[in-house]
Image: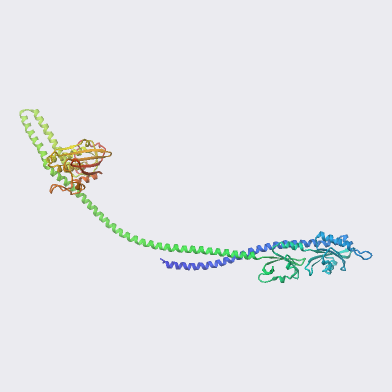
Amino acid sequence: MQSRVAIEKQFRLTRIGLFVVWAILSATGVAWLVSSAKERALSDVMQKAGETLSVQTEILSGVLDKYRLLPPLLSRQSSIRALFVRDVEGNAQSVDARRVAEATSSMSAAMDVAFFFPDGEMLANARGTFAQRAEGLPQLIAVALQGRLGRAALSNSQGERTYAFSSGVRRDGKFVGVVIVYVDFYRVEAAWALSARRIFVTDKSGTVFLANDPGWRLKSLSDLRQTGEVDRYLINGRLEERLDLVRRLPLLEWDLHVLADPAPVAAARLSAATIATLLSLLVGMIALAALRRNEGLTIKARRDRAIALRLERVVRDRTRALSITNASLSKEVEVRREAEERLRKTQDELVQTAKLAALGQMSTALSHEYNQPLAAIRSYADNALRFLDRGALSEVSGNLSRINGLVERMAELSRTLLSFSRKPGATIGPVPLGTVVDEALLLARPRARAAGVASIRVGDGVAGVHVLGGRIRLGQVFVNLVNNAVDALSGQADAWVEIDARREGDRVVVTVIDNGPGVEPEQLPKVFEPFFTTKGVGEGIGIGLSIVDNIIRDFGGTIMVVNRPEGGACFTINLQAAESDAGISGVQAPATAGADA
């Protein structure tokens, strides 16, 4: 895996290469955009200047065309021909000619209209100095004499300029005179003055003949222009760059010029260069930011990958350690399960041993229970034999009935002992509480009588109540509780034990109380602990109440003990109430071995 330094070096080289590429592309792009902007701006400037040139060309041509047609029209009029006839004294009609010239000049807005004889003598004119000075007159007369339209651009030292058109006057085929019309350019130059561009006309000698700048008129163009890569013209006292658009006027042998300001081209180039540079900088910054971001993401990805690999190694090591720990825990769990199983078996054996020990403790009282019926049976049997010898059959029948009752009592006691001594199963179901209590008292009463406990009472609430549990194990609970009370009451006068029950919702609360000395307050929390006993050595091992607590918990119930205010102890059992089972009625037969009915 590449290190951070290697990645940074790689991206540094990439940035250098990107900068070189960006510089080349930016320079190319800026140059192309500047060139394109220059061409577009130049085209726009030239287009607008060309439009101005075309308009002014048409205006100038229109003005000159109007005056170009005037001399031929005048020369063909008979009234004009009549002006060149001399009287007998040789006088010309100068007054009429002058009047006609003035009228024509006024109507046509010409600078001047003049009439000349072929020898150059002026017949008349409207006004102006060009006709009076006869400037350009020989050329104009010579061309008119040839029957062509004469034309000439004229100027004088006072700066006056005009364009003259001449046409010959013939009468009876004879050349008698010349009509010359002088054009005034004042209105043309006044119109040009409204334009922001320089407009001027140069003749074939390069002299500025017409211009909207008075300072340029009748000056050589070479004095007003500095040639170079870009021509500079003298404008407002300083040389400025201008673009010169020229339109040739061949008939006049003039060139019409329009100067366009190249400032928009420079502005367009500057704007294009600025925009292109900003765009290239923006693109470069975006590319650099993207590269930096990619570099950061790459470094972060490599760092995350390194962290992930470290975490994978840590997880693998931890997993291996956890696997070892889990295997160890599995073994430990298995050992604990086996220990719990052994403990459960030991507990069951201990419970059974406790039951057998209780049976051993009750053996003396039970032997008395059996000896009394046996002695009575023997006595009733001997009497029956005597009554048979005497023939007193009614007395024999009575003795046999008594013997039968005693045998049934002994058989019930035997069945109860057999059922109590067997190991119970784990079956839980509805059991009649009254039956269980009766069977338990059948085993406990002989020991109670032997201990001097005169009364074991069963309350009315016990009969008809069913609880959820096992018949044999629940009987063991009451045997242990009654025996525990009997041991506490031993030797006490007027001792008694009472068992009662009450229904509270879906629970049944059973109480076992006595009028003995009770339990010491500091010993109350310990009475259900295994091997805790207050009896003397050899009188008990202290597991009876612990067995009772475990059995009640197995049935989903609780047991607690308190001292009664009037003396004695009170054991309270809380069990789940159950509906009466159809198969349970009265005193049931003992369950099979291993079952908990």
Regarding residue 522, the answer to whether it shows in the image is yes
Relative to 39, residue 428 above or below = above
Q: Which picture quadrant has residue 384? A: top left
Relative to 435, residue 193 above or below = below
Classify residue 240 as left or right of residue 454.
Answer: right
Q: Please count the marks in the image.
A: 0
Residue 81, percent across and down?
A: 88, 62
Classify residue 142 as left or right of residue 427.
Answer: right
Q: Which picture quadrant has residue 228? A: bottom right
Residue 570, percent across and down?
A: 20, 42
Between 312 and 134, the residue placed more toward the observer is 134
The outermost residue toward the front is: 565
Residue 27, percent across and down?
A: 56, 67
Q: Residue at x 43, y 68 (%)?
A: 6
Relative to 204, residue 366 above or below = above
Between 421 and 73, the residue placed more toward the observer is 73
Visual colour scheme:
rainbow
The quadrant of the rendering that contains the C terminus is top left
The quadrant of the rendering that contains the N terminus is bottom left
Q: Which picture quadrant has residue 422? A: top left
The outermost residue toward the right is: 88
Classify residue 294 as left or right of residue 240.
Answer: left
Regarding residue 256, the answer to whether it shows in the image is no
Relative to 263, residue 363 above or below = above
Residue 571, percent across and down?
A: 21, 42
